[in-house]
Image (cartoon, helix red, strand yellow):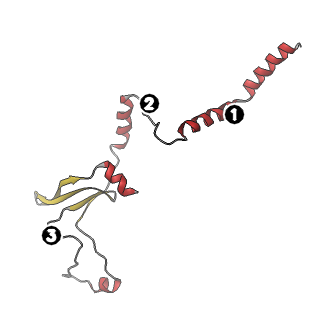
Amino acid sequence: MNDETENVETEKVEKEKDPWAEAMNEQAEAEADTAAGFENLEDEGSPGDEEINMEVILDVPVDISMEIGRTKINIRNLLKLNQGSVIELDRLAGEPMDVLVNGTLIAHGEVVVVNDKFGIRLTDVISPVERIKKLK
């Protein structure tokens, strides 16, 4: 074989033989692109993709609870509680209740009665930005 044919053959073998080097180079380039942070994250999917993704989570059940108030007592006083005992809470009468979804505050509201059942009328919904701030 001559030198030219040998070089072409060597290049072919190197290209076929080293897919890992190519993959590692791609990964290094991708990491370099995102090294500055998350600013360059963009939605590259079509609008139809968002609807499909939302459909996946729309039937996931969550726990919603309303909190009237809280307090701390020691075990001695806890053991003294019996029927008719009154526990003082940290909220004033008429103050809005907290509405929690899976333990995360999402709104405030007031108690209502509908068809002899309790409900809550939302008076203030916490914005997603504020909810994220409280998580930190």
Q: Is residue 55 left or right of residue 124?
A: right
State the mark number for residue 32: none
Which quadrant would residue 49 be assigned to in this image?
top left
Circle 3 residue: 93
Say what amino acid the circle numbered 3 marks.
Ala
Earlier in the chain: of badge 3 and badge 2, it is 2
Q: Is the residue marked by circle 1 packed among few (<14), some (14-19), or many (20+) residues within 10 Å?
A: few
Q: Report the residue at 84% width, 17% height from top.
A: 6
Frontmost residue, 33 versus 101: 33
Which quadrant would residue 22 be assigned to in this image?
top right
Frontmost residue, 113 versus 70: 70
Which quadrant would residue 63 be assigned to in this image?
bottom left
Labels 3 & 2 near each other (Cβ < 8 A)? no
Query: Residue 52: image x %, image y %?
Result: 37, 34
Earlier in the chain: of badge 1 and badge 3, it is 1
State the mark number for residue 20: 1
Measured Cα–Cα span from mark 1 to mark 3: 67 Å
Q: Report the residue at 36% width, 43% height from top.
A: 57
Residue ranking furthest to the right: 1
Circle 2 residue: 44
Q: Is residue 31 left or right of residue 44?
A: right
Query: Which quarter of the rendered picture does the N terminus lie within?
Result: top right
Frontmost residue, 114 versus 44: 44
Q: Helix, strand or loop at disc 1?
A: helix
Say what amino acid the circle numbered 1 marks.
Trp
Q: Report the residue at 38% width, 40% height from top.
A: 56
Say what amino acid the circle numbered 2 marks.
Glu
Earlier in the chain: of badge 1 and badge 2, it is 1
